[in-house]
Amino acid sequence: MRSIFVAGFLALLLLLQSVSGSSSGQVLQEEKRAGVTAWIVPHSHDDVGWLKTIDEYYEQEVRQIYNTVIEELDKRADRKFIIVEMAFFTMWWAEATEQQKALVFKYVELKKVEFVLGGWCMNDDADPTYSASINQMSEGHRFIFDTFGVMPKYGWHIGMASLFLSFFFFLFLSSV
């Protein structure tokens, strides 16, 4: 997973480098930046059961992500974090302290934490059909609404494998 993050970060650097026309890593001049806006979005995405079991991912990576984020968000007013998969978040929520839960409620209210996509997992992680996508999204959204009284406003999708397969299947069925 870390190698995927590093590859994505390097791709972003190459994109910025190609826009600047510089190979020395210089800071872009203001007039050359006008057409490019880069957003770095701290997020919780980790594949649910891709190379490890969900429990292995949670124990080895995800628990520490949430514990660290909850500690760090208070340190700067401009820090924000998006939570993607409810499969992992509900595991963390079940063992979170009352103090951690209170902080998450506060962060959601202040929009320092936001739920995006909000499914049990990303559709490419485990959903072979559109009905599975609908079911897992519904389950994740129900948890968010029942717990925090909010619903995700934005989608988030990193891997496009089954998303596109489902899309083309929909097109096939609709004779488009």
Image (cartoon, helix red, strand yellow):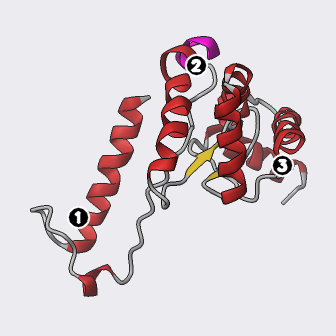
SS for dot 2: helix
Of 114 and 70, nearer the camera is: 70
Residue 59 position, x and y percent, is 54, 14
Q: Quadrant of residue 127?
A: top right
Checking the image for residue 17, the label placed there is: 1
Q: Main secondary structure of the magenta part?
A: helix
Mark 2 sits on what residue? 58
Give how far apart the Cα atoms at labels 2 and 3 are.
Answer: 34 Å
Q: Residue at x 68, y 46 (%)?
A: 164
Label annotation for residue 170? 3
Query: Which residue occupies the foreground of this view, 52 or 173?
Result: 52
Element assignment for label 3 = helix
Observer-side mark, 2 or 3, equals 2
Q: Amino acid at mark 3?
A: Phe
Q: Which residues are magenta?
A: 51-58
The residue located at (41%, 35%) in the rendering is 4
Mark 1 element type = helix
Residue 53 x, y percent position in the rendering: 60, 12
Q: Residue at x 62, y 12 (%)?
A: 55
